[in-house]
Image: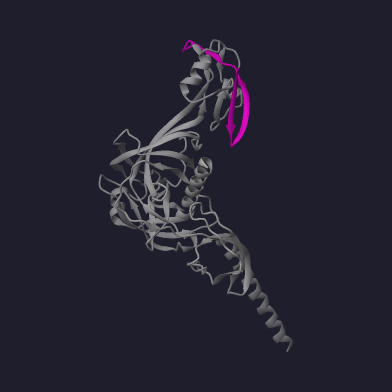
Amino acid sequence: MKKFIKSFTALMAAFSAAVFSLCGAVAYLTPSELTVNHESSLKSSYNFPVSIRYDGSQAIKTDTASQKNNSVSGQLMLFDAVPVKNISINFAERQYVTPCGTPFGIKIYSDGLVVARTTEIETENGTKNPSADANIVCGDIITAVNGEKLKTNEQLLSIVENSNGKSIKIDGKRNGKNFSTQITPVPDKNQNSYRIGLWVKDSCAGIGTLTFVDNTTQTFAGLGHGICDSESGQIMPLQSGDIVKANISSVRKGCCGSPGALCGYFTDGEPIGTLNANSEYGVYGTLDSYKTNNADIPVAFRQEVVRGKAQILTTVDGNPPQYYDIEIENISYNNNATKNMIIKITDERLIEKTGGIVQGMSGSPIIQNNMLVGAVTHVFVNDSSHGYAIFAENMLAYNNSIVQKSVNFVS
């Protein structure tokens, strides 16, 4: 009898340890917040025997336009019996958008000047770096000089050249926090003028892929990640911006260690839309004119995205957007904003044309089970057949927040 009890105790201890470990894995690999609509099931699509329990008597109200809704508390249950963690359940109406996959040109004018780098100045008394001495670093955003708001590089250059070597006050932002410093320009013996050793950018332009259009609000989303300064890596702070039509003229194929790129050009200088945001979730704005033959499709909630076959809609030549086969290999709820999925290009046609995912393809919509589930964001540098993707739900939520801010501002 004692032997049986010892064996039973050991068995229960091993079982408890296994359940505890599984609970920990489930808690880590599942989200702490879900959005569903009234018609959809709360049954999860995870590869775990889990269910969701909540108090169904709680009153729920939804606001389709803003996606603001009351949330209820629930519990994630393992085997429908073991509580794993508390979760928030948001109820919202299903939204429909038009997937695009078309190239578009982007013109951004920054809100302030982005510091690309600092450099040494040759003076009669040796080399000096006034900006570095003033503790200005790559990625800082210079917003004003001597109290004057900055909009262009030329504006800063003029103030420095006319300083006569007198100290100037710099106001800026670093990691979202304001700072001030003093810089004393020095005479550049090669240029015969005053310099502060600062390289800055006030604008940028490029080509990306349009993800979706919301026809109810005439708004759009693209890229799935922010537009950054190439040298500092800082997201360009948006003062204003436009989108224009663009064509893809050629492709530079990607290979191990060298990401490829879509090469294109702006076809028309006239804007077809206005940029309202440049964020980690992509670029967003309002359309003046846009035509597509694509039909509206539902946007998937994140828990509806599953591993397996899917398609991306993208443009890699002068033809209209085409569907190409991919595989969603991994789904993560605990990664950063733009790396929610790992995808693999499996379509031989696309691999032959591009080598896989290339620069300029960011924003290409991902379709699975006739729903928009995400958008391409990044390519693996050492394996261009693989890349990251963002949940479409994240992009739509950000777009809705911008629309709501606009409504509140007008009202």
Q: Magenta part of the protein: which range? A: 168-192
Q: Name the residue at the bottom extreme.
A: 1
Q: Name the residue at the right extreme.
A: 2
Up-down relation of residue 171 to residue 265 (above or below): above
Residue 114 shows up from this direction: no
Task: Give the quarter of the image for residue 170.
Answer: top right
* Figure disc tally: 0
Up-down relation of residue 337 to residue 309 (above or below): above
Q: Quadrant of the N terminus?
A: bottom right
Left or right of 371 in this view: 394: right
Query: Going 35% across and 36% down the picture, which residue do you hit?
Result: 271
Front residue (pair 208, 240) = 240
Q: Main secondary structure of the magenta part?
A: strand
The x and y percentages for residue 163 are 55, 13
Query: Going 63% across and 64% down the picture, which residue do you hit?
Result: 85
Magenta-drawn stretch contains 365: no
The x and y percentages for residue 109 are 45, 31
Query: How is this picture coloured?
Result: one colour
Up-down relation of residue 169 to residue 359 (above or below): above
Residue 311 shows up from this direction: yes
Left or right of 315 in this view: 141: right
The x and y percentages for residue 42 are 52, 68
Q: Name the residue at the left extreme.
A: 319
Front residue (pair 321, 274) = 274
The x and y percentages for residue 26 are 57, 65
Magenta-drawn stretch contains 174: yes
